[in-house]
Image: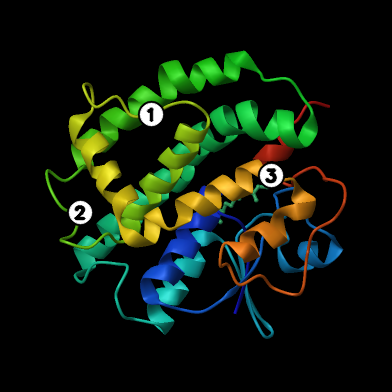
Amino acid sequence: MLIIGNHISPYARKVLIALAIKGIAFELDPVVPYFGNDAFTRLSPLRRIPVLVDGDFVLNDSTVICEYLDEAYPEPPLLPATPRDRAQARWIEEYCDSRMGESIVWKLFFQRVIGPFVWKQPTDEALVAQALDHDLPAILDWLEGVAPASGFLFGEAPLMADITPACFLRNAAMAGWTVDAGRWPRSAAWIARVWATPAFAATLPLEHIQRTTPRRDLRAALSAAGVCIASVSHDDRTPRRGVLTSGAILAP
Ligand SMILES: N[C@@H](CCC(=O)N[C@@H](CS)C(=O)NCC(=O)O)C(=O)O
C-alpha cells in the first residue's frame, strides 16, 4: 500500500496515524503539496494529499481513506460502536476538516508557512488576524463543549474524532498558536493526551524532519528515521497552483 502525503498535512497525518494504530504496513511518497507531477494529478484530481494507492485501487480524501481502513482492517476500531456515537464522531471529524481546515490550514498555516516557503509570497496579516482573533477562539469555544473531562471522546482509546482536532492543532502550533489552557482547560488537556499517545507522538520527529529538511534530502532523511519510503515519486521540481481554496488565496 502506498500513501502519498506527509507528516505536516493534518489530513495526511490522520491517515498515517490510523495506519499506525492498526499496524498496517505502507510505503510513503512524501510529496509536498503543490509539487505533485502529472502522474499525481491523475491519482488526485484535486491535487491534494493524502492519496492511498493499492494496486489499481486509488482513494482520495482523508476521511474516506480512514473509513475504508476501518472497514477493511477493523481492529482496533477508529469509529465508536453505536450508530449515534458513530454519527457524532463523523460530525466532529467533519467540523474539524472543514472549519479548522479553513481557519488553521488556509488562513494561519498557509499564510505563515506554506505561502512564504512554497510560493515566496508575503504573509497576509489580515487573514492571520482573522484566524487568531475570530476563528480560533470560536472554534475552541465549541471544542471546549465537546472535549471529554478525562480519557477520550468515546472511551479509553483515541478514535478519529480525537485524532482529527489534534492533527489540526499541531498545524496551529507549527504556525505559532497553542491552546490557552487557562481559557480552554478541557480542550488543552484532551489534545495534550492525544498528542502523547504512541501513534501520535511517533509522528512528531517525522513532522520535524519534514519541516526542516530541504526537499531534495527529504526522502533520505525520512528513510534514515525508519519510514519506508516508496521507490516511486510523484514529486515535481516546481509547484503548481491548487485546484480549490488554495488556488484562490494565492497571490496572482
Ligand atoms: N478534504 C481533503 C483535504 C486535503 C487537503 O486539503 N490537503 C492539502 C494539504 S494539508 C493539500 O493537498 N493542498 C493542496 C491544494 O489544495 O492544492 C482531505 O480530507 O483529504
Residue at left 24%, top 27%? Answer: 181
Depicted 125 relative to depicted 89: above or below: above
The three-letter code of the residue at mark 1 reads Thr
Depicted 192 relative to depicted 49: above or below: above
Q: Is mark 3 within 8 Å of ligand 1?
A: yes
Residue 232's disc is none
| Residue 67 visible to the viewer | yes
* Residue 66 horizontal/vertical position (percent): 45, 67
Most extreme residue toward the left is 149
Depicted 115 relative to depicted 79: above or below: above
| Residue 35 visible to the viewer | no
Residue at left 67%, top 54%? Answer: 48
The three-letter code of the residue at mark 2 reads Phe
Q: Is residue 156 left or right of residue 158?
A: left
Measure the alpha-carbon separation of dots 2 and 1. 20 Å
Most extreme residue toward the front is 224
* Residue 128 horizontal/vertical position (percent): 55, 20
Report helix, strand or loop for mark 2. loop
* Image quadrant containing the C terminus: top right
Image mark count: 3
The answer to which of marks 3 and 1 sits earlier in the sequence is 1
Measure the alpha-carbon separation of dots 2 and 3. 33 Å
Residue 152's disc is 2
Q: Is residue 88 left or right of residue 1?
A: left
* Image quadrant containing the N terminus: bottom right
Q: Nearer the viewer, mark 2 or mark 3?
A: 2
Q: What residue did someone put label 3 on?
A: 244
Q: Is residue 240 left or right of residue 183?
A: right
Report helix, strand or loop for mark 1. loop
Q: What residue did someone put label 1 on?
A: 178
The three-letter code of the residue at mark 3 reads Leu
